[in-house]
Image: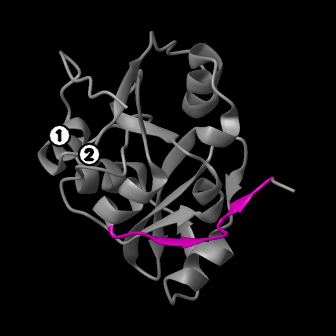
Amino acid sequence: MARKQASQGTPATATLAAAGVPFVAHPYSHDPAAASYGLEAAKVLGVDPARVFKTLMVDVDGRLAVGVVPVSGNLDLKAMAAVLGGKKATMADPAAAERRTGYVLGGISPLGQRQPSPTVVDDSALGQDTILVSGGRRGLDIELSPAELIRLTGAHTARIGTGRT
């Protein structure tokens, strides 16, 4: 996989470049009226939604964490809490998520966050050669090996996504 970074520089792509991880940047024209950033990316890029993953910030017993799940489903908050040894998980306050990561909603990447948080990647990623995650801004996804994403984020893998068979 070739590295593409020209004019797409974000903390996420800088993290990948610094680690020598091959990735492909997939910029697209974001429609502000799109109801789902991830499903929009899958459609515009012509990629199976099971390969496009969204990054969700959650609050697990007062601690922020990151869940990475396919855009074709949802995050199972109970499973997320259990993986991290917590009792309850809720979606994080949007402003807190933006402050913690340094990214805006709809562009939060699991990579290159201002303050890294415990991360859990849905285990369905392991069945893919490559997956796409936000590249750190709306209208930019990055394609990389799920193993590299897991390595660079220090993520756990578990079944935290819903909506699959």
Above or below 64: residue 9:
above
At 51% across and 90% down in the image, what residue appears? 85
Verify CB contact (< 8 Å) between mark 2 and mark 1: yes
The local crowd at label 2, few if under 14, some if 14 to 19, many if 20 or more residues have their Cα within 10 Å, is some
At 61% across and 26% down in the image, what residue appears? 42
Picture coordinates of residue 67 (x, y %)?
50, 61
Q: Is residue 155 magenta?
A: yes
Taking the image as shown, residue 109 lies to the left or right of residue 54, namely: left
The local crowd at label 1, few if under 14, some if 14 to 19, many if 20 or more residues have their Cα within 10 Å, is some
Picture coordinates of residue 117 (x, y %)?
31, 67
Counting labels gives 2
Residue at the extreme right of the image, as rendered: 165
| Amino acid tagged 2 | Val
Picture coordinates of residue 63 (x, y %)?
37, 77
Circle 1 residue: 17
Q: Is residue 113 magenta?
A: no
Above or below 6: residue 54:
below
**Disc 1 element:** helix
Above or below 129: residue 152:
below
Circle 2 residue: 21
Taking the image as shown, residue 121 lies to the left or right of residue 107, namely: right
